[in-house]
Amino acid sequence: NAGVMQNPRHLVRRRGQEARLRCSPMKGHSHVYWYRQLPEEGLKFMVYLQKENIIDESGMPKERFSAEFPKEGPSILRIQQVVRGDSAAYFCASSPRTWLDTEAFFGQGTRLTVV
Amino acid sequence: EDKVVQSPLSLVVHEGDTVTLNCSYEVTNFRSLLWYKQEKKAPTFLFMLTSSGIEKKSGRLSSILDKKELFSILNITATQTGDSAVYLCAVALGGGAQKLVFGQGTRLTINP
């Protein structure tokens, strides 16, 4: 859905650099989810955030990965010291409430390539 | 571990054919099942199913859920080349786990 904005659309990083992926949810949405899609695989849940709070980060690697959703501004997924295995498409989804009541809308994704 | 399995993984048919895509699941706290279409970009929402046996329909697409046998099917009739995409099935978990568990997707190719 065009309402969820992710940038950049494509990101190339050398091994060891940092990657910052941004997600601006749809207007009025306070719930943000990050998913990772490896080539030829389905989407894998990483983290669920509400404004200023991480609700569930059970799908996020313990090291090098972090996420935030500040009071003002977009949600950021940060990957430090990237490795080749981090190459994937990272999708953000937002919803006005939890999954229980409504489907979420996905952004266009950021394709990260680590060289 | 919560699991969603789709079959087939890949399907090639001719324009005009009817296709059935399958999704089975095994999760601890089922809330709803969703189907998405993905064409090299964001997954776009197709259906959300919460009740068994009630068919949801949108044009040539339809879907139904069987909560006893833990599966769902997505039917596409009179397929067109524009239906070529990856179709993703996901289960929304209830309780305290607010997330979707996705299957690996079915890559559908419609040849003219």
Image (spheres, coloured by chain):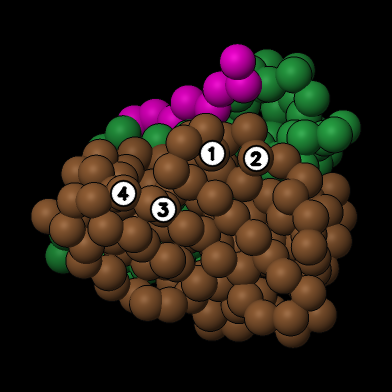
Chain colours: A brown, B green
- Disc 2: which residue: A57
Inspect the image, locate mark 4, and give the three-letter code of the amino acid beneath it: Gln
**Which numbered disc, 4 or 2, marks the residue that appears first in the sequence?**
2
Question: At 34% across and 59% down in the image, what residue appears?
Answer: A18
B107 sits to left or right of B78: left
Asked if labels 3 and 4 touch by Cβ distance under 8 angstroms, the answer is yes
Segment tinted magenta in the rendering:
B1-8
Q: CA distance from mark 2 to mark 1?
A: 6 Å
Does label 3 lie on the same chain as label 1? Answer: yes
Q: Residue furthest left?
A: A115
Query: Which residue is rendered at x = 87% and y = 32% of the image?
Result: B95
Q: Residues within 10 Å of mark 4 (few under 14, many from 20)?
A: some
Element under label 1?
A: loop
Q: Which mark is residue A81?
A: 4
Q: CA distance from mark 4 to mark 2?
A: 19 Å
Q: Is residue B37 left or right of residue B52?
A: left
Q: Nearer the viewer, mark 4 or mark 1?
A: 4
Residue A79 numbered mark, or none: 3
Which mark lies nearer to you, 2 or 3? 3
- Specify whether residue B4 is painted magenta: yes
Q: Earlier in the sequence, mark 1 or mark 3?
A: 1
- Seen at 44% across and 31% down, the residue is B6
Q: Chain of mark 3?
A: A
**Which amino acid type corresponds to the residue marked 3 in the rendered image?**
Ile
Compared with B53, B28 (above or below) is: above
Report the residue at 47% width, 58% height from top: A78
